[in-house]
């Protein structure tokens, strides 16, 4: 009798935890066709090429579709297909958050969701040792299943410094990393957001990121990942630093080296503070805390499961005394950085004077050099991106203006080969941004406009000649307007 009961219990357990078959997942996974039009940074007055791509998505609660945000960059039309069928339904992008990597879609035609089932989210478990399954519909409308094995979990950052839980899986996939749902034991464990074909590494946004987005949109408004960006260093075994700042034996934490005022907590945290704990959770000397996935970096305590408007409490060591500080979490500010780090979906701004094409230095401008832009982009621009891109503050500049190139014309003869120069001043006035440059030029009373660039390069344009010849120059290059700069 006991043996029979044990066997029955084992059989029930095996049925409960057996992974679902690929066929049973076909009603959870959908195809998404994205039509995009890239921005043309070389000729910013016109749009770039139109392209189409097929990505994957997963049905979740509330008749919503979850996918990768970066797979939908610069979209102009989104369509969805189900169960390998030929019919396309128009989809609406409800949320596209480049700071967490996820996008959420809706479909007005309720018929689309007939026969589809929302995926159940996996709990926050230790997933090491469990095989994952990745699903997608291929271009031939065949349903594909791939096995993936977890190799690493960590806090990864999307610009500007927004932390998410990211898993790395080894896989045999040759094409993917574009919104494919990843399941473990039949439950949604993450959304694929990248694939390294050389190492066969699939990058997957963890279920915490998904759950966070679902809760954030529940009230009808999406606030996004809380903004927290302080510079810090691990204390580790630095005996001198620990003794100098008064850390006790057995205490651990991270040492703050810089606190931008624009960050959440920027008004209460200070340089040389040592963060000992966050909301009662201890931080070790490597800046890590314990999670079901192992050790993760401490930013996860502030950004992964928290929401804009919530209050964070920290215990910090300041001036050799332990104190408690509290601060409210802020959203990511639109103009947080001198060089905009996210340029997707935005029309590039420009200003043309005398054939000189001025633009803002943005991440999008650098990415226009190609996939390997860090190798191919002008080294002078890369210096500014790497060294001084970070937080803007009230000061001399609000951004960087770059001379993209010169449109050859008699008014700029001798300068037509200049390009990718950082502008310092116009007529002796330090230029704050593109709008400020336009104001300086239009308000100038002198005949000549003198542009000074970093590297001691000077360009002088005859203002009267530039004005009188502007119409012909625009006609020659088929440009409808000499600027795309909003009024202040």
Image (tube, rainbow, N blue to C red):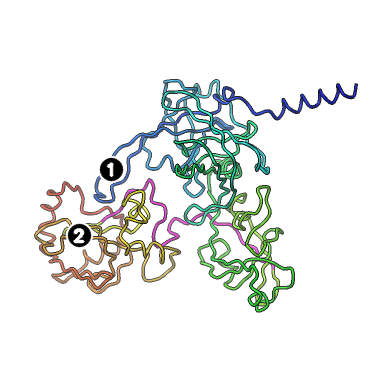
- Residue 316 pos. (x, y %): 66, 68
Residue corresponding to mark 1: 48
Q: What's drawn in magenta, residue-wise?
A: 324-350
- Residue 250 pos. (x, y %): 74, 68
Secondary structure mostly seen in magenta is loop
What's the mark number on residue 356? 2
Dot 1: within a 10 Å radius of its alpha carbon, few (fewer than 14), some, or many (20 or more) residues?
Answer: some
Does the magenta-highlighted stretch encompass residue 339?
A: yes
Residue shown at 16% from the left, 46% from the top? 478
Does the magenta-highlighted stretch encompass residue 447?
A: no
Residue 447 sits above or below residue 53 on the image: below
Quadrant placement of the C terminus: bottom left
Quadrant placement of the N terminus: top right
Quadrant of res 128? top right
Compared across the picture, whether 10 is left or right of 347 comes to right
Q: Distance between the residues labelled 2 and 1?
A: 21 Å
- Residue 462 pos. (x, y %): 12, 66
Residue shown at 20% from the left, 69% from the top? 444
- Compare residues 247 and 95 and report the one nearer the observer: 247
Dot 2 or dot 1, earlier in sequence: 1
- Among all residues in the image, which is located at the extreme right? 1
Q: Can residue 215 be seen in this view?
A: no
Q: How many marks?
A: 2
Compared across the picture, whether 444 is left or right of 331 comes to left
- Residue 389 pos. (x, y %): 41, 63
Dot 2: within a 10 Å radius of its alpha carbon, few (fewer than 14), some, or many (20 or more) residues?
Answer: many
Q: Can residue 152 be seen in this view?
A: yes
| Secondary structure type for disc 1 | strand
| Secondary structure type for disc 2 | strand
């Amino acid at each position: 009798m006991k043996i029979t009961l044990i066997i029955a219990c084992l059989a029930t357990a095996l049925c409960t935890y057996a992974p679902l078959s690929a066929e049973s997942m076909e009603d959870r996974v959908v195809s998404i066709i994205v039509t995009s039009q890239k921005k043309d940074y070389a000729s910013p007055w016109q749009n770039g090429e139109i392209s189409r791509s097929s990505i994957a998505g997963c049905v979740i609660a509330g008749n919503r579709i979850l996918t990768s945000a970066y797979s939908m960059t610069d979209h102009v039309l989104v369509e969805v297909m189900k169960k390998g069928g030929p019919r396309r339904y128009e989809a609406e992008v409800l949320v596209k958050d480049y700071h967490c990597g996820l996008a959420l879609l809706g479909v007005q035609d309720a018929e689309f969701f007939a026969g589809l089932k929302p995926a159940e989210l996996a709990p926050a478990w230790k997933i090491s040792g469990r095989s994952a399954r990745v699903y997608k519909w291929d271009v031939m409308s065949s349903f594909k299943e791939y096995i993936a094995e977890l190799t690493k979990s960590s806090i990864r950052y999307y610009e500007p410094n927004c932390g998410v839980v990211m898993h790395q899986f080894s896989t045999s996939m040759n094409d993917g990393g574009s919104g494919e749902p990843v399941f473990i034991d039949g439950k949604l464990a993450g959304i694929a957001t990248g694939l390294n074909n050389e190492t066969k590494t699939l990058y997957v946004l963890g279920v915490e990121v998904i759950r966070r987005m679902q809760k954030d949109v529940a009230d009808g408004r999406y606030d996004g990942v809380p903004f927290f960006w302080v510079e810090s260093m691990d204390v580790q075994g630095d005996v001198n630093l620990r003794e100098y700042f008064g850390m006790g034996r057995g205490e651990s934490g991270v040492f703050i080296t810089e606190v931008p005022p624009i960050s959440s907590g920027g008004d209460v945290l200070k340089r040389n503070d040592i963060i000992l704990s966050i909301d009662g959770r201890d931080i070790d000397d490597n800046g890590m805390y314990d999670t079901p996935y192992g050790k993760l970096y401490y930013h996860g305590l502030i950004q992964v499961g928290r929401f804009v408007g919530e209050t964070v409490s920290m215990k910090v060591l300041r001036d050799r005394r332990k104190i408690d500080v509290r601060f409210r979490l802020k959203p990511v500010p639109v103009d947080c950085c001198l060089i905009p780090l996210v340029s997707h979906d935005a029309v590039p701004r420009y200003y043309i004077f005398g054939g000189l094409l001025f633009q803002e230095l943005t991440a999008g401008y650098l990415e226009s050099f190609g996939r390997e832009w860090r190798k191919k982009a002008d080294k002078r621009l890369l210096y500014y991106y790497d060294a001084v891109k970070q937080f803007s503050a009230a000061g001399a500049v609000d951004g960087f203006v770059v001379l993209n190139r010169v449109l050859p014309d008699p008014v700029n003869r001798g300068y037509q080969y200049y390009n990718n120069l950082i502008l310092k001043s116009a007529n002796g006035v330090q230029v704050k941004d593109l709008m400020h440059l336009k104001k300086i030029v239009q308000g100038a009373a002198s005949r000549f406009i003198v542009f000074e660039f970093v590297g001691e390069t000077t360009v002088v344009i005859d203002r009267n000649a530039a004005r009188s010849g502007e119409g012909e120059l625009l006609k020659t290059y088929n440009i409808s307007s000499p600027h795309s700069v909003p009024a202040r």
